[in-house]
Image (cartoon, helix red, strand yellow):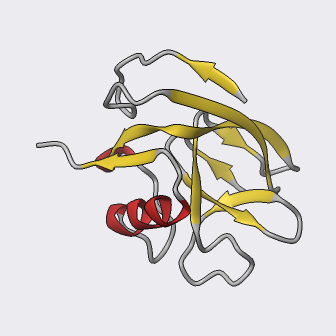
Amino acid sequence: MGEATFAPNDLLVSYVPVITRNITIVSGQNLKRGAVLGNITASDKYTLSASAAADGSQTPALVLATDCDASAGDVVAAAYASGAFDSTKLILGAGHTAATAEAAFRKAGAPLYVRVLK
């Protein structure tokens, strides 16, 4: 895992330690920074988490740290394993809300936090 320092921007919103790790994004998608990812259990690859999925990816697990074009094949990309995020900047898959993503992070004990900013 890599570790970065906090730099306020449009996605990160707090002094929670920011930790990234490299993951594999499954082919067939073009994802933007802030996408909430789920892990496909059988392949250990990641995709945009959708609540109706039945392959493990229905559970939000990480947040994509950089834009990632995997439309032509699997791509290794950085994802946040720790951090606090502006709820309005997250990209959520079908059936998810900022609240369901936050609940999944809490249930897993992940140091990922979703903040509703005013």
Residue 98 position (above or below residue 21): below
**In this rendering, position of residue 100 left or right of residue 51:** left
**In this rendering, position of residue 51 left or right of residue 68:** left
* Place of residue 27 in the rendered image (x, y in percent of width and height, measured from the top left): 82, 56
Q: Quadrant of the C terminus?
A: top left
Residue projecting furthest to the left = 118
Who's the residue at 78% across and 47% down the image?
70
Front-lying residue, 113 or 65: 113
Q: Residue 28: tell me if it is visible.
A: no
* Place of residue 22 in the rendered image (x, y in percent of width and height, measured from the top left): 76, 36
Front-lying residue, 110 or 77: 110
Who's the residue at 55% across and 62% down the image?
108
The quarter of the picture where residue 16 lies is top left
Who's the residue at 75% across and 78% down the image?
55
Residue 50 position (above or below residue 66): below
Q: Quadrant of the N terminus?
A: top right
The quarter of the picture where residue 84 lies is top left
Q: How many marks?
A: 0
Q: Residue 68: tell me if it is visible.
A: yes
* Place of residue 110 in the rendered image (x, y in percent of width and height, measured from the top left): 53, 51
Residue 81 position (above or below residue 15): below
* Place of residue 42 in the rendered image (x, y in percent of width and height, measured from the top left): 87, 71
Residue projecting furthest to the front = 109
